[in-house]
Amino acid sequence: MTVLSGRVRPTAFLYLAAIFVASSATAAEIWPKAAASSAPNPALEARVHSIVSGMTLEEKIGQMTQADIRSITPDDVQRYYIGSILNGGGAWPSMNMHASVDDWLKLSDAFYRASMSTDMKVKVPVIWGTDAVHGHNNVYGATLFPHNIGLGAAHDPLLVQRIGRATAAEVRATGISWAFAPTLAVVQNPRWGRTYESYSSNPALVRSYGEAMVKGLQGKLGSPTSVLATAKHYLGDGGTFHGKDQGETRTTEANLERTHAAGYYGALKSGVQTVMVSYSSFTDTSTGKSWGKMHGNRHLITDVLKRRLGFNGLVVSDWNAVGQVPDCTNWHCPQAINAGIDLVMVPDDWKKFIAATIDDVRAGRIPMSRIDDAVSRIVRVKLKAGLFSASPATGPHPNASALHSPAVRELARQAVRESLVLLKNNSNVLPLRRTGKILVVGRGADSLPMQAGGWSLTWQGDQTTTADYPYADTLLSALRKSLGPNRVDYSPDGSGVDVHNYSAVVMVAAEKPYAEGAGDISFPASMRHTSRYPQDLEALEKVSGKGVPVVTLLYSGRPVAANDLINRSDAFIAAWLPGTEGMGLADMLIAGADGRARFNFTGRLSFDWPAADCLPKSGAIQFHRGYGLSLASRTTLSHLPETAPVMACPAESR
Ligand code: BGC
Ligand code: BGC
């Protein structure tokens, strides 16, 4: 600041004024008006009003409650007027991982009937939400699509829309009508364990995919194949410092709008009905203001999302996330409700939540107008979803074959093909000819858990075996189907085989499955794949450099440093987390009977790919976003730099 002889110079004054404006930026200065595309419907609004105005306080707070099926029964739903239930990752009917579609339908119907037999003037149906984030992934026998990072590499919004349609049919086949998807995180740091839930680090791509996925999931709202979609996690989940799960997003509000909100514009355009708030917190680097946890951020939830962007659906909190707002517990957080949260995901402590929140209203800590707004949003969404007219379990809905019909499996197989990014194909080793024998190496090559990643049957995607996926192919089984069982041998660690007996080696390097914070590569740990999984390098070294071409696929939820693996391979494919359809991998590896490729590689990176153990400052990117070879590229990748493994990374700026 420049002060001359006790007087502020005019230029300095302007400068101060500018800072003042910046620090008190109103929603109107940063955010475009009304991104949501919903024409007001007076008949609907009148119905909402008449239902809500006839409700008691107990009924209203019950409607604002969402409990996990592990902690609530249909009787509870009836008695407490519960508005919503969910099955968190790894929650199934009777806690049976192999529950049948019929078991899901029966449970759904029991909850629905309970909600329709309360003593409310107008009975309000309960709504069930599920994390169908790559197909209906909690359900035994469901087709699992590639995780979002793979779809991002496919650069095909229409494909994403069709996957949304197919996923909606899978979900409706089990009597569930709400999917907690899509994740619209624009991930800035691949250390984050949720990177694979993100389509891209490119806001424009996330925007177009958000639009397509919501369109696909919601279809025609209220129809038997429609589910409500959820834009999550609002806002800035992909921007946390060091990629820490549930961490702190340090940026400006203008950059929140420009980068992290992109997907929400797409989702709102497609009429998304629900938004889930992020566990992360926001610190505004232009003003220095620390806003704290998003769940307490009234400015961004109410002023921006609801008022400025015109969102009239419901805002749901994340799993026990209100408990992270200062002075709150998992079951008591008037701050979060006052900030604009309408439905509270309080998986276990829902009874305490209801009692405490009723108290809050009686004591004036939450105004009745806020409660009425929240409940109106919940009822409006339920009306639009058609829930008042028929049970999602017994009304018209797709049948069990929606989960693994030939058509849905073919769609997932196509998605696998489109998602693969070819990073190296020296001497044009791909596609492999159908003559000769193939040696398959690597722990991941016959592991559905590794091929599917987190959010697969269980929350972390672990505690399962390949046998838990009855309609699926690992890469090994796909190659055997494609070439014949006698033409493919398997050695998980590359030992006990003479490589010279084979015409080619197919190696799979893989991350173990993980979800959320358990998947963080916490700073300052190395981002090199083989620092975390040295057995993959050991296996590869046993088979490489012997004059037999080696094709390596990497199953990973993010780009990782892999120059050592790439150097020891003739061809290298970033395969992400492809899901149940291993046949899509075989399609790309093996030539047709005429010796020619059956499909070309069209996938392109939707994230930058790191060159070294620590995250790119400028220049340390090995392959830039957008990179990817086609079979016609004829690019020879020369030896890439291999630095000594790093135990702890120096400071990273993001
Ligand atoms: C649940 C998940 C949830 C997680 C949050 C788990 O116990 O099964 O659905 O996302 O907790 O911490
Ligand atoms: C996750 C959400 C998910 C919820 C319900 C949370 O831990 O952050 O993405 O929808 O659990 O399972």
Image (spheres, grey):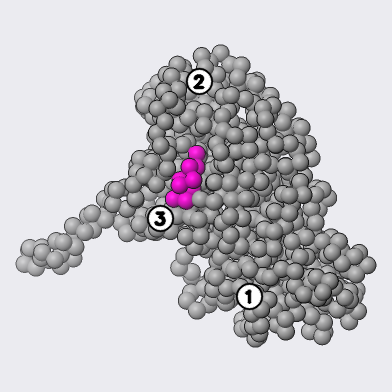
* Residue to which mark 3 is pinned: 256
Which disc, if any, is residue 59? 2
Say what secondary structure mark 3 lies in.
helix
Which disc, if any, is residue 629? 1
Residue at 78 percent of width and 77 percent of height: 550
Q: Disc 1 beta carbon < 8 A from ligand 2?
A: no
For label 1, the crowd category at 10 Å Cα-Cα, with few meaning under 14, some 14 to 19 and many 20 or more, is: many
**Who comes first in sequence, dot 3 or dot 1?**
3
Say what secondary structure mark 2 lies in.
helix
| Residue 576 percent across, percent down from the top left | 66, 62
Amino acid type indicated by mark 2: Glu
**Who comes first in sequence, dot 2 or dot 1?**
2
**Horizontal side, residue 551 vs residue 360: left or right:** right
Which disc, if any, is residue 341? none
Amino acid type indicated by mark 3: Leu
**Horizontal side, residue 558 vs residue 33: left or right:** right
Q: Tell me the quarter of the picture where residue 544 sits.
A: bottom right
- In this view, the residue in front, 102 or 83, is 102
For label 3, the crowd category at 10 Å Cα-Cα, with few meaning under 14, some 14 to 19 and many 20 or more, is: many
Q: Is residue 645 above or below residue 474?
A: below
Q: Which residues are magenta?
A: 265-273
Is residue 310 something that shows in the picture? yes
